[in-house]
Image (cartoon, helix red, strand yellow):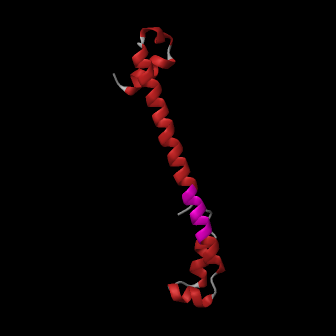
Amino acid sequence: MTMTTRINAVYHADMRAATGHEVRQAAAAVLDAAWRGGFKLLETLASWQERSEQRRKLASFDARMLRDIGISRAEAAREYDKPFWRV
């Protein structure tokens, strides 16, 4: 039985036809998918926060520091002016 079939057994009117085991399997599959989705969301939020902090630091660099890393003030401005969600 596929995961879609198990989920349909839980959410449709023919739920009485599903065994307790099938219902538990479907519920486990839904919880597993939600867990993975939640973890991915946390990873994305952490990535956005780090990117924002790095761009804030780049904006504070003086001309000497920018020269040391090999970028111009204009290149730095293009990078730190981007919104945090844009790579």
Q: Which residue of the protein is positioned furthest toward the left in this rendering?
A: 1
Magenta range is: 46-54
Residue 6 occupies which quadrant of the picture?
top left
Q: Using the image, determine if residue 12 lies above or below residue 61.
A: above
Left or right: 69 in relation to 78: left
Query: Which is more toward the observer, 39 or 62?
Result: 39
Q: Position of residue 79 (x, y in %)?
A: 58, 72
Left or right: 20 in relation to 85: left
Q: Position of residue 74 (x, y in %)?
A: 60, 81
Q: Which residue of the protein is positioned furthest toward the bottom in this rendering?
A: 64
Tell me if residue 80 is in the magenta stretch: no
Q: Position of residue 8 (x, y in %)?
A: 45, 20
The residue depicted at 59 percent of the width and 74 percent of the height is 78
Query: Which is more toward the observer, 34 or 70?
Result: 34
Left or right: 65 in relation to 31: right
Q: Quadrant of the N terminus?
A: top left
Q: Using the image, determine if residue 24 lies above or below residue 79.
A: above
The residue depicted at 60 percent of the width and 77 percent of the height is 58
The residue depicted at 52 percent of the width and 88 percent of the height is 68
Residue 85 in view, yes or no:
no
Query: Which is more toward the observer, 19 or 12?
Result: 19
What predominant SS class does the magenta segment belong to?
helix
Q: How many marks?
A: 0
Residue 43 in view, yes or no:
yes
